[in-house]
Amino acid sequence: MKPDLTRHYVLITGAGRGLGKHLAGHLAACGAVVGVADLDAGTTAATVAELRAGGFEAHGYPGDMADQDTFLRVAAEFAALGGRIDAIVNNAMLLHYCPVEQVEPTRLGAMLDIGIKAVFWSAQALLKHYDPERGASLINMSSPVAHRGYPNTSAYSAVKGAVTTLTKVLGAELGPRKIRVNAVSPASVPTPGALGLNSKEVYERRAATIPLRRIGTEADNSHAVAFLLSREASFVNGEIFNVDGGASSAG
């Protein structure tokens, strides 16, 4: 049973493909009005067209959400549709794994910009455009790498570790203003971006190390986010929701 998110205005970054695209479709099916924000104008337009063809309300916003001005502009445009934003989901992230000696400034800077800085811009945007009486939600994306050490993931792990801490801090800071801040931490999910980094065999090996003996799916992630946005989660704040089959807790 889907939670009722009728006329909830939800802005999702990185929603042109992968986890973000699936999430946009799932939340739209729950009744939400979704804002599809993505760096790639083509995938943004394609996702919006697909959702509209399914009878859902979706609006596209191509742009670099790592840039503060862009994030605030997109948020203002989306908020103008219904007079508010009810939730922002920080899904966008640049995936790259390599040994620490191969980490270079340009790519590291891009990962820090979209992975960490954008979380600050999202909080600023939500504070500008939420309804203080209704309250709002901010959802970040964490990862099991924030809890366990995985070789060759130093940059990605640094970002997700910061996101995990920021989620707790912002939950404490914004909670009194009726903004709940939580994070979803999914297991390995073979999205198009991830498949460019890992083979099928890698995912099979990962599944063997997860207590539930399977990798994650886009639906696993989308259901978790929808729950955190629902009224059933109205007293959940500052939490990291591990949707990883037990990978984080197993050690």
Image (cartoon, helix red, strand yellow):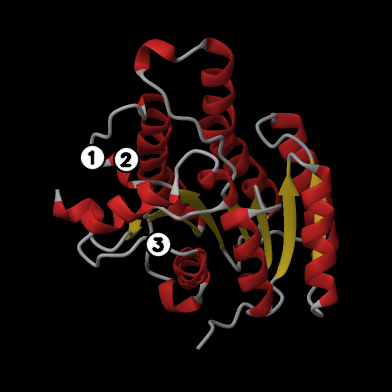
Estimate the x, y position of residue 83 in percent, counting from the top left.
79, 62
Element at badge 3? Answer: loop
- Taking the image as shown, residue 101 lies to the left or right of residue 251, namely right
Proximity of marks 2 and 1: CB atoms separated by less than 8 Å = yes
Cα–Cα span, label 2 and label 1:
5 Å
Q: Which dot, 1 or 3, sits closer to the camera?
A: 3
Estimate the x, y position of residue 57 in percent, counting from the top left.
80, 72
Instruction: List the residue tagged with mark 2.
Output: 145
Nearest the viewer among 248 and 18 is 18
Nearest the viewer among 197 and 244 is 197
Name, please, the residue furthest toward the bottom: 1
Element at badge 2? Answer: helix
The answer to whether 250 is drawn above or below residue 67 in the figure is below
Q: In which quarter of the image is residue 20?
A: bottom right
User: Closer to the N terminus: mark 3 or mark 2?
Assistant: 2
Q: Quadrant of residue 110?
A: top right
Nearest the viewer among 10 and 159 is 159
Q: Which dot, 3 or 2, sits closer to the camera?
A: 3
- The kind of residue tagged 2 is Val
- The kind of residue tagged 1 is Arg
Instruction: List the residue tagged with mark 3.
Output: 216
- The kind of residue tagged 3 is Gly
- Taking the image as shown, residue 241 lies to the left or right of residue 70, namely left
Q: Which residue is drawn at 32% across and 40% down?
A: 145
Q: Residues within 10 Å of mark 2 (few under 14, many from 20)?
A: many
The answer to whether 103 is drawn above or below residue 177 in the figure is above
Instruction: List the residue tagged with mark 1.
Output: 148
Cα–Cα span, label 3 and label 2:
15 Å
